[in-house]
Structures are given as C-alpha cells and as structure tokens.
Amino acid sequence: MLSSMPLLTSALPFSAICPAWWISQPDGSSVAQLKANDPEGEPLVYGVSGEEAMRYFSVNQDTGVVWLRQQLDRETKSEMQVEFYVSDIQEVVKDTVNIQIGDVNDNSPTFHGQPYSIHIPENTAVGKSVFMVNATDPDQGTGGSVLFSFQQPSPFFAIDGARGTVTVVRPLDYEATSAYQLTVNATDQDKLRPLSRLANLAITITDVQDMDPIFTNLPYSTNIEEDVPLGYEVRKITAIDQDLGRPRGIGYTIISGNTNSVFALDYISGSLTVNGQVDRENPLYSAGFTLTVKATELKDDRSPSDATVMTTFTILLIDKNDNAPKFNGSEYRVHITELAQVGFALPLFIQAEDKDEGVNSMFQVFLTGNNSEYFTISPTAVQGRADIRIRVAIPLDFEHIRSFSFSLYANESMSDHVGFARVFIELINENDNRPIFSKPLYNISLPENTPPGTSLLRLLATDGDAGTFGSVRYYFSDEPDQFSLDEETGWVILRASLDYELMRRFTLTVLARDGGGEETTGRIRVNVLDVNDNAPLFQKEAYVGSLRENEQAVQPVARVRATDEDSPPNNFLTYTITSASVFFDFFSITMVEGYAVISVTRPLDYEQVPKGMIYLTVMAKDGGNPALNSTVSVTVEVIDENDNPPEFSKPSYIVKIPENIIAGATVLLVNATDLDASREFGQASLIYSLEGSSQFRLNSRSGEITTTALLDREQKSEYILIVRAVDGGVGPQQKTGIATVNITILDINDNAPVWRDEPYHTNVVEMSPINTDVISVLAVDPDNRENGTVVYSISPENPFYTINSSTGKIRTSGLTLDRESSDPKDAVLMRTIIISAVDRGTPQLRASASTTVFVNLLDLNDNDPTFLNLPFVAEVGLRGTLAINVFRIDPDEDKNGLITMALQMGMPRLDFYLNTTTGILTSTAVLDREQIGQYHLRIIAYDAGKFPRTSTSTLTITVLDVNDETPTFNPRVYNVSLKESVPRDHIVTRLSCSDNDAGLNAELSYFITGGNQDGKFSVGFRDGVVRTVVGLDRETQAAYTLVVEAIDNGPAGSRRTGTATVFVEVQDVNDNRPIFLQNSYETSILESQTQTILSASENILHFHQSNLKVTLFLHCLSSFENEFPGG
C-alpha cells in the first residue's frame, strides 16, 4: 500500500497564494512555526534546504519552529527566498517562502565626500550658502532621515538641519579670524534610539582687500635747522596694508601744507627730503610746516587703489643767528610843545626787530648826540622785537633850545650786526605868561539913586608876553545886569538902577585875557548907599481874628505886623485903625513885642453883627521925610453860642409797608428844627440817627428812612424805631431831639412750600395690589391763609402711583410692579416718585425743588435663572485641558437669586466636572479628538427660593486636534511594472496615505528617502504622485526599490512620519539592435558539401530573452550569389 504525502497546512506565516514573512527579530529568536499533517498520521520531520538559508535559519525537526540562526541585515539583503520542507518516512513536501527583512535603526549616518574643507572670501555676504554637507543613512523611515547640526554652535555659520546647507550668518573678517574648524553632527530621526556621526568641516577665510592702510610710529613731528642743504632727509614715513593675507605696496604723496614745495616725498620709499631754501625768518615758514600726507595702497600694476589713509606731519625750523637788528625807519621827525612834561612820550612809531629767535634776537638800544640828556629811551635791552619810546627827561624851553638831533643805535653782540637811525625833534613855542591886575581888589561906594550910564572905575592889567600873547582884554566872569565893562579900555559903567533894599553890595569877578588865551581874575566891590524909597509892607495881605459873643473882658482878636526895607530912621513904623464896618468904637490897637495888637473893649452881640463878621482897616506909616504908609484889612468873626435844642415835627410816626418793598426804598421822611442861627448849632448842623433795627437806614442829613434789605413778614411783622436829631454842639453843649417810628409789615405770597423730612424712603412688595399705601409726604408754607395752603401732585406723571393733592398720601395705582423689569424707564418709575408742591396764593408759588420718594421694591421669586454665555460652543486643545466658566444670573434677590448648577445625566458627562457653586466646568479625563470630537452637555440651573425655579441650556465642546497620529500608507508596499519606454514625467503610481488628525496636522508632504540615488523618480510634494524624472533603461537597471515618506504639517518638533515601499520593475522593449562581436568573419567550405558557415549565439547578444529572436540575412558578393538563398 502506498503512503500518502504529508500535507503542509496554512499555518502562519504560510500563505497559499503568496508565501511571505517579515522578519526583524534579533538572532536566536523564533520567527515562525511550520505546521503540516499527514493522512496516515505518520511522524513528520521539518527542515530547511539551501546553503544560504541554512546559514541564517534552523528548524526544529519535531515542532516545526523556525529559529533565526544569525542577525539579518536589511541593508545587505532586503529579502530572501527560503525553501522549507516536511517529510514522512517516504515523501518530502517543499514550499518556498519570500522573506522580507524588516528594518531596525542599526546604521549611523554616513558622510560622503570627506574630508570637508572649503575656502571662502571674507566678504562673503550674510545669508549666502557656502557648502552642503552630504550624509545618508541606509535605514528606512525616520531611522534613515538625517538632520544636521553643529556640535558646538558657531556665531558666524549656521547649517540647515534638513538640507545640510552651511550659510554665513554674521560678517566675516580675515584680520580677526582666518580659519574656522566646525564639527557637524548628522543624526537620524529614530525616536527610540537615534544614531549620529560627527564630521569636521574646515573653513578657511581668504583675505579680501577691505582694510585701509595705516601709518606706523605716529605721531610724525620733527625739528630741522633753517639752513639745511637741499636733499636733506627729514624723516622716512612708513605705512602698511592692514590686509594681512597679501598686503599691497604703499604710495606716498603730500596733499597739503607744502608751501612753495619746500619738501619732496618719495612716492615709493616714503623718504621726506628738503627740496628748497628754508629760512625761518620767512613769514610763510616761521610757524613751521604741517604737512598732510596720504598713503595709498597700490594695485599689482602699481596704479593707486581706493584704499587710502592720511595723517599730518609737523616740522618746526630751528633758528640760526643770521639777521642783524633793524629799525622800521632810517629817519624819524617830530614837533612837540615846549610845555611837554617830564616823562612825556614822543609821538613816534619806532620799532626795532631782530628776526632771529631766542638769544640770537637779543640786542641793546641807545641814543647819542648833543643835548641827548634831555631825553631817555626804553626799552634799552630787546629780544626779538620791541617798540622804542623816547620820553622827555628834563623840562624843555623854546627860548633856550629850539631843536634837537640824535643818532639811534641797535647793537648785537656780533660787531657787524648793528641797526642805525636818525631822530629830529622841533619844539613849538607856547604862551607861558599870564596878565596881572594892578590891584587884587577894587572898592567903590555910590548912592542907590545913581543914574545909569555913569562911569565908575577903570581896570588895568599887564602881560609880560610880546605881540599877540601880550595883548590884554577885559571881561566879567559872570555878566551882571547892573554893570558893563569895556573889554579894550577896562572902564566899568553903571548899566541899570540900583536898589539898596534889594542888593546893598556887589562883588564882581573880572578876567584879564591875553592873545594866547591865558587869563587872570580880579575882584570889584561896589557898596550901595540907602535913600527912603520903600513904603511899609505888611507880612500878610489880610488878617483874620475871632471871639465869642458876650465876652466881658478886653479880648485881643488879631496881631498885625509890617516891615520897611529902608534903613533907620526911615524904617520906624506907627499903626492906627482907620475904619470899621460896625462898632468902630469897640476896638483899640496897641504895640506888643513888635506887633500891633487889635482888641475888643466891650461885649459884642452875635445877633446884631451881620453874618457874624466885622471888617477893619489898619494903616502903618514909616519915619521918613516925607513919610510913606500902607494899609491892610482885618476881619473879626463873632462866634455864636448853642442855646436851642432840635425839635421833631411829630413826637411819633406810624407807617405800613408791604413785605416785598425793595431794598433802598423810602419808608418815611422825618424833620426837626433848631432855632440857633449859626451853621454850627442851627438847622444846618442837625444830624439824624436811628435805633431799633438794622433793616432800616436813616439819612443823617435829610432824615429819610429807607430799607437796607428785603423784608420778610414771616420772620418779623412789626418794627418800633427811635430817631434822634443832634445839633453841632460838643459834649455838654450838644442838644438832642427824639421821636418814635412804628412800622407794620403787610403780608404777600412770597414763600413757596418747603419739604420736610426729605428725601423719602419706603419699602413696597412687588406685585402689590391697587391702593396699597406707600408713604405720606409733607411740605409747609409759612405764608398766611391761601398763600400758605399746599397742593401736591406727581410730576412728571408716574403710572404706577397716585397721590392725594391735599394730604400728600401716595398709593399704588394698580399697574403691576415688577422689580426685575427689563424696561429701564419702568424700572426708574417704579423706584422713583417725584412730587411737586404749590400753594394757593396769587400768583401760585411752587416748591423750589421737587422731592423724591425712593421706593425699595421687595423681591418675590418670580424669575427663572438665566445663562449669560449659553448656549455656547467651546474649543479645547493641547490634548485634554479644559476650564470654562459658565456665567448665570437670576435677577431675584437673596435666596431667590442664589443659583446652583448641575450636569444632566448622560455618557459624556463622565468626562467633565461642573462646580455647582462657581460654575467652572473642567475636564476629568484626557480628551481625544479621534475618539470623541464633540460633546453636547446639558446644564440645569435652579435658584434657592421657597418654590425653586429652573432653567436649562446646552454647552457644546469641540476638541481641537493635536498632532498625535502618524501618517499611514495603504498599502505599505506598492508593486509597479513599467515599460522602459515610458516618457519622462510618467505617473508610476499614486500613493495613498491618511492621517487621522485634522487641519495642518493632517496635511501631508511626500518625499523619496531611499532607492533614488540617481534621481530617476520624483514624488508630488502634496499629491503623492510618483513620476519618472528621466527616461528608464532596463539594460542599465531593471528594478528599483523606492522608500517613500509622508510627513505631516504639525508644529515643528512634533511632526510625524509614515513610510512605504514602492517596487518598480522595468519591462523590456526592443530598443537595441543585435551587435556582432567581430567586424568580419571568414571560413572555407567544400563546393560539394552542405554545412553551417555562421551561427548566432546568445553569448554574443546580451539582451532580454523575449527580444532575442534574430534573423540573419546573408549577402554574397560573388558570382555565386544565387546559390545562397539566405535564411
């Protein structure tokens, strides 16, 4: 009986259709188990066949467990075909498994093209890319994605993490740093065990001509003697190029300061030499030279560049004694007065100068010649330059010496260095003698009545000078009005009449002046003799005296006095009373101590004297012969006595006035009389006064009583005043009259109602019924009768309340009072009642301001709680954090408005917690948008009233996406076959990849990260379409394994990557001709024999089998062509 074959079942990982394994375990791991059954139940033996397979795998022959014998390396071989078998005693069954080697991150990135060394110029622009580091990692996915960084950050360079591009980030400077050694770190992006590798990047900075030259050994300054020879080297100027890489030569030039080209500067060597005569005494050179020198970098062709620098070079000249002293002139002439004082400096500008310097410029100055002792010079010792002053040393005299001539020398220590000049001085004659009077004082006396024109006196003065200087003329120092002087003869003549009483003596100052203007003074004394020519003169134009009436004793009333300017006895005076207006006999005159005293000898009666005044005439007569006299008036006032009191026209006055009388209005005019006649004590002297109230004023002169302010009957309705009239007497002599005034104030409606106890506050329960008492208000009016009766009203109208117009009681009107009313106007009207009050007077008066009743509405629980921010849609991100404050309000008060909240039952509420008091809703679980993207929470709010009221609303919570999902390809492996003839940009396949995130987190970017070293394929950055970039050639490469990555657009640092593999098989097309291995073939055949002369072999045609069908055509170039049909 034949044994049945064992049957290999479909135990994993076998597949009847496409047997394949995916292996990434370490060596020593079990990777699969083979299972089979045998119909006869015979024992089975498992195994693996093939040398390579047995090197990597072992199979337990009893259990079929497959073990990995040694570590696989995907980068060496990414797939294997392994043949496994199972056998019973007689038969063997084999099956082949395609094993895909799974990738692990076991390779560090590898740098290509090392060593890295570049040279860049120092003026490389910031932001410019200077090098690209190339590193790859054969691993797949994130383990094969490489990011670059500098191990130690550089302040001057940055590296792009993805592309490896090195850019300049700060300006470079060769002179500061000429080379940089950077360490580049290439790290793969494996999240569990990233691997990295370092590489050195040497950057050498090449110098660029960007630095100006610089002078060395600054500052430049030197001294040279003034007579140095031509070609003398002053100094060598040196400058260097600051560009140290390849410094350039320097060219030197003088820019400015080289007066008359005295110096020459060698363009190449920088040697500064003397090029002309240098004389320190030359004004152009005396201060030295300040040269501006420019150094210019030279190009390779020795032409100047733009790189320059400038500096200054100071050169001072050292003096030599090569100049003699000199005067500024060879001859000096001057005229001076003979009166020049000792020390007087002659007006000559003499200057001596030695143009040398220091001790070389020192010299002596002196004056020689006849009579040189009359003058001195200064200074005598000079250094450099000085102004020479010649001064008078001895007084000069024109009459003694009229002119001088001298020699002026300036001598230096060297005998041949002498300066010389001549000085000529002429004296000017001066008037030096004064006139002299024959007498120092001339005296003369004459009567005051001497006629004008009389010659009084002749003056005489002599002058020792001759000629014009000796001619004398006469003048008054101050020209008098009474005298004149003949300037040539010297006669003094009376020009005007004299008056002894005005001027008794004249003292005149006279001048004698010669022709040169010299003067001498003299004096003349003129004595005036008196004659009686002046009448007596009273000291006052009029005199006034007074006395009281009825005086019994003799009373002096006035003193008079006169003077006479004549001399005795002409000025002896006598006095008499020549007339009187009344009572001539009542007056006498006597002399007392030089005064004429006028007295009353009998009592006078004031009432008999007209207007109380008596007018006298008094005469004074002198003692001359004939005698002269004068008169004066004397007024005597008789003073009245006070003997009558004032009396009012009525002893009592009664008057009524309205209370609205204006301030200043006249109330009453009182009048009193006084029988005394004088103004001092009579009617004109009366003064009125008022007592009893400050509300009234009495005119002290007219007796008019007026109001001083507005009256108010409600304050005071009657006034009793006392009026007084006093005359002009003083103290006990004063007399007084008294009367009373009774004033009654009549009422008018002048008071508006006034509120009491305002403002008013009251409590009213909302929803109160009609005619509910609210409050009573009260206003008072102090006026009488109708003027004081008050009428109440609500103004403006308030529909919620009414008021009794007489009593002021307020009640509800029946209109609903709702404390929580949303109408702002009604809310104000319910809580504020404005009351007006007027009286019944004519005209009616209204209270100055309305009063306000403030109503406090007591609450009833009549309102449901209200959510302020619900319904609401909230968004939460950052994976699971949430805190939302639910705002709510209940317009009721106290417990009626105290709100408690809760979540209604439901599954989503398990993820949230609501604080029932604060209203803050927080998450209690991690929120994941991919599990639940939106929550709809039902929230209930209820108040704490006796009969609670409730409200509900909805809170919608949308969970925002975070980048927590990895892009996933479907499928992960793509198998594509293409003909090699497809054009460029041909679509190879469309990748399908999804990311469960949302928004930018789900936006994918595609990259080919492996298998595309020669760049034949590309992938759409957004659409994931794989295309050919160039034409394919199966004969060059028959298959490609592309590794494709999809990276989401999440935030930097948290982006996720998915990987897929695209297997591309390139199918052959007939695009190559057969190629002979030789250019010609030769053979020999027998003419009678049939044999093969040429054959084609696969060995000479290396093409795909399906295109290897070759047809040979034989062309014979002989006469036997027809014998070979071809084929």
Image (cartoon, rainbow, N blue to C red):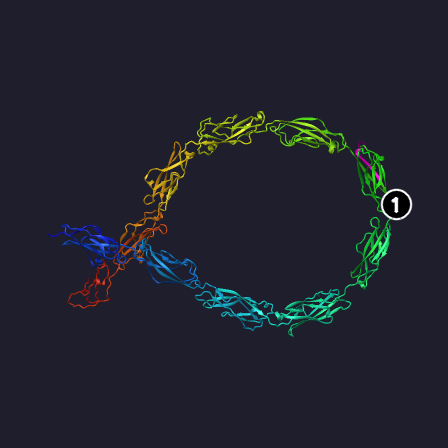
User: Going by the picture, which residue comes out furthest to the left?
Assistant: 1
609 falls in the magenta region: yes
Q: Secondary structure at mark 1?
A: loop
Instruction: Residue 228: name its quadrant.
Output: bottom right
- Residue 882 is at least partly visible in this image: yes
x and y, in percent, of residue 379 in the image = 67, 68
Give the side of residue 820 with respect to residue 847, left or right. left
Q: Position of residue 697 (x, y in %)?
A: 66, 32
Viewer-proximal residue among 870 and 1081: 870
Span highlighted in magenta in the image? 606-618
Give the image quarter of residue 1076. bottom left
Image position of 17 with respect to 889: above or below: below
Residue linked to disc 1 = 624
Point out residue 654 in the picture as x, y percentages from the top left corner: 67, 26
View extreme (right): residue: 625
Compared to 730, does 239 lie above or below? below
Q: What is the three-letter code of the residue carrying label 1?
A: Gly
Could you say which is closer to the camera, residue 255 or residue 136?
Answer: 136
